[in-house]
Amino acid sequence: MNTYDHSKIEKKWQREWEKKGIYEAQDGSLAKKFYPLVEFPFPSGAGLHTGHIRSYTAMDIVARKRRMQGENVLYPIGWDAFGLPTENYAIKTGRPPKDVTKENTDNFRRQLQSLGLSFDWSREVDTTDPGYYRWTQWIFIQMYKKGLAYKAKTEINWCPKDKIGLANEEVVNGCCERCGTPVEKRVKEQWMLAITKYADRLYADLDKVDYLEKIKIQQRNWIGRSEGAEIDFAVKASGAAVSDKIRVFTTRPDTLFGVTYVVIAPEHELVSKLSYKNKSEVGAYVAAAKKMDDIARTDAQKEKTGVRLDGVMAINPANSEEVPIFVSDYVLATYGTGAVMAVPAHDVRDRAFATKFKLPIRRVIEPAFKGLSGDGAIEPGLPFIKRDAVCIVVRDPKTGAYLCNSWKGIHMHGLFTGGVEQGEDLVEAARREILEETGYKNLKHIRTSPIAINTFFYHRVKKQNRHAHFTFVFFDLENGERAPVDEKEAALHEIVWKKKTELKNFFTVFEGEFILNILDSDDYVNVDDGVLSDSGSFSGLESADARRKIAEAVGGKQVIRYKLRDWIFSRQRYWGEPIPMISCEKCGWVPVPEKDLPVELPKVDKYEPTDTGESPLSLISKWVETKCPTCEGPARRETDVMPNWAGSSWYYLRYIDPKNKKALAAPDKVAYWAPVDWYNGGMEHTTLHLLYSRFWHKFLFDIGAVNTDEPYMKRTSHGLILAEGGVKMSKSLGNVVNPDELVGIYGADALRVYEMFMGPFDQAIAWDSKSIIGPRRFIERFHALSEKSSEDKAAALSKETQSLLHRTIAKVSADIESMGFNTAVSALMILINALEKEAAIPRADFETFAKLVAPFAPHVAEDIWAEIGNKGSIHTSAWPVADASKIVEEALKVVVQVNGKVRGAFIAERGMDKDALEKAALALDEVKKWVGDKKPEKIVVVPGKLVSIVVR
RNA sequence: GGGCACGUGGCGGAAUUGGUAUACGCGCCGGUCUUAGGAACCGGUUCCUCGCGGAUUGAGAGUUCGAGUCUCUCCGUGCCCACCA
């Protein structure tokens, strides 16, 4: 038996696997297919990152296990090779990007192969291969034909350093995602993809797929669906008749009666169309706003600015009231209609603006609270009895404490409240109530809050559903003088004085909890739904109901709006797929005929974008000048190229049929393999790549190119690997871990096991160079353990180890599926600790163990498999199945607690009932010691688990 | 400001449904073998206490026979989004 030398065995088995093609997926198989996918890498000059290894190894383990379970597995890999880093490198060195890419992919391939990943290398794809991007271009043309690709003059985010237009998604905090340079605005003709036309489906179909919940949430937020209404406000110029109108978008038509002004975006067309008096003032404001960059302008913290349009008024369609019109940059031209109705009472932004410009605030939604559970839970079916009431806040200015009320005998804490008779003065009613219930007689009225609330609850004594309408009245206590209190009242209430800081945890009733919002001022902005007030005939309705009714009454249109914007698809660069379009003076934009695809990237001398911001392709007149496919007249090629999200939007389909020259993939093969069963990748791709590729896939589904409407059935994500110390790994910090070095020192198997063992797969974790030795030792011990594998038929594991083996089979199988790789490795370590203590291990049991290790450490497992005399590969052997009958009931051990503390344990006999377990527990010496001669007050018996004894 | 995670030994972390907290690994301490060891192996290792015993999952409260796990409040950390009407 040799000692373990990873450098000898790893290369050897990698060659062997390659030769036999054991990881190749079988087309046309009848077996159940399994298509796991990892994000194909951008082959950078820096080489493979430890993060790639984490994700790729994880899915490799799943793929290997499924293969051993008899599934036909397609685990492919390729290169997402278009992209700026390569282009920038080419600019710096003058070397063709194609050559650089070749070098980098060769290096990546070598590195991936050195890790023993079970990719099907026969299906490798490369987005920069004309045979590949021919189909990327083809998809673009299909989109153009369906009207989804269009050219538009748009204000784009422009990175002055990279000389490139960026999609909104590529702008991070107002800076270029790649180089961090602040982004400028430029107007440019750009190709756009109408992803917004798919917004509803991209949103709704998330219900169909099995993505991690946080991924779904992020996508939903990004798409930003909101239901609302478009409502027209007529515009009245002073003296003149109604001429124009402002259309606003609102999600809250229920607040329409609370509108006190209207705001339009600086870019709104009415800014120039309307005739108002202060043109120059407004013009200056608009110009300043347009000059500001996005970061400054959209900073929510920034103080609100704006200008009123003098001499024009908007007419609220709900009540025909005239309200002023403002221009302000807090309204975005690109969302909704670029105009909002401002309701400062119920929107924090409108409130901030109104406060600054001293505009009126009109409250039309009263907060509402409903008893849903507990004592006050509303009794369905019973009508609500409405009562006006006051909630009385009495402060003792000497101590700063507030007068509170605890109901005697029940767990209910609040303030003193009381009913108000019709026509009764609120302040007088409040004084009367305090006097009756507490005896305090000298109160100084401070204020009565304009904010009233509604509470809905079940009144247990009166057996009624109640709707209390509370007004809050504030007093200061002038002195502690008290009148005698009626005995009946005194028996109900207990007077408590509470400090402000204690209030939050004290109150148990709605009006008490709410008071904290308005204790010091009435500035509270209620943005929640509630009950309408001061809204004409709609007063008294609930928000949800009122939204529909009010919108309808004023002729509003129900609309659904999205935050998602169309995708800017043009890049004025070289290293990307040429956009296959031709511009003809006569015919306009004409797509390149499909027979002429691909439009190949021509050779250029310089890779730099031109100073005008045009692609370097524009300098090659021989390439640019062409004939119109329609009229044969002179025409020019589009010189923009696609963004690097293009090739990755459909690559998973190309793996299915990578060499097909007639179609992006043959329909029968797509029918078998698609969709991807399980896609693992980074959270950073949730709103970009993942959304884009779902969009493309849905489009391909619509034109019949694929037969499913979602590309990925399941999506999981891995956590980042950070450098030692928890900071980001980066070349500039010099803390990058080099995989080649680790494979050299510890071996691929140890590196794989370490990356799986280091922590929970979905969480970020810092690299620790010391810890990798643990997995290395595990592998060495595993290698050494094969000596104990015995052919002797009489050899047997101890009962406990036998049981552990089968429990480990079950645990590892389940953990792999749930991505609990760290606990799976831990279970294998626990098992090896037990196996090492055995004198001999029956060969079958040893093989079972080896199979469990195989997906994690494929080389050493294969080596030992061969060493003990197997012919085929362990990776095509059958995955073990746990035998329940071999799992000894651990549950026989019963723990005994006395007053919640563990005081002993005993082994129960099979079939003991609760009484027997109780008796056995009480008979224990340790238990007797703690129970003494006291009589147990309560005994809880959980069969198979524990006995819990309570003594006082 | 909003959303989503999370907080357990010196460190990474474990703990199906509430049921023996600290598994597994690193590190550290002691030992064996060695000329030696930053190698390997064996043993120990949450904290306080000589011990009996007690304390402990960011802090505080609640529900429970029993809480790392459920509820509430607070503190702290990470990620994403951020004037989206």
Image: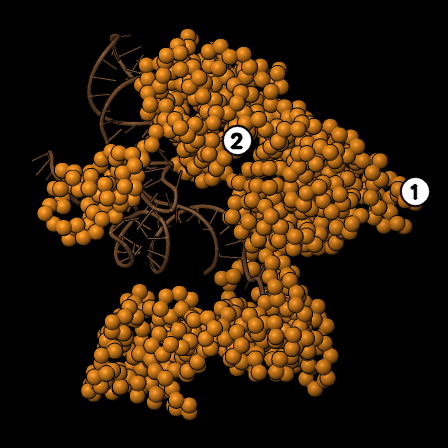
Chain colours: A orange, B brown
Q: Which residue is mark 2?
A: A62
Q: Name the subunit of mark 1.
A: A
Residue A931 in the image: state x and y as whole percent.
14, 46
Q: Earlier in the sequence, mark 2 or mark 1?
A: 2
Q: Would residue A362 be visible to someone looking at this image?
A: no
Left or right: A730 in relation to A787: right
Give the numbered dot on residue A632: 1
Q: Nearer the viewer, residue A256 or A856?
A: A856
Query: Looking at numbered disc 1 in the image, what kind of residue is underneath it?
Result: Glu
Residue drawn at point x = 42 percent, y = 18 percent = A846
Q: Quadrant of residue A784?
A: top left
Q: Which residue is at 66% across, 28% downward?
A: A30
Seen in the picture, residue A158 relative to A55 is either above or below; the reply is: below
Which residue is more in the foreground, A434 or A356? A434
Residue A708, how many percent across, how many down?
Answer: 68, 43
Q: Which mark is residue A689?
A: none
In the rendered image of this protein, does residue A79 appear above or below residue A713? above
Image height of A64 relative to A516, above or below: above
**Quadrant of the drawing holding the N terminus of chain A:** top left
**C-alpha span from label 2 to label 1:** 55 Å
Question: Going by the picture, which residue comes out furthest to the bottom?
Answer: A423
Say what amino acid the circle numbered 2 marks: Val
**Which residue is more in the foreground, A654 or A870?**
A870
Q: Position of residue A812 (x, y in %)?
A: 44, 30
Instruction: Name the residue: 32% across, 32% down.
Output: A890
In this rendering, does residue A885 appear at all?
Answer: yes
Chain under disc 2: A
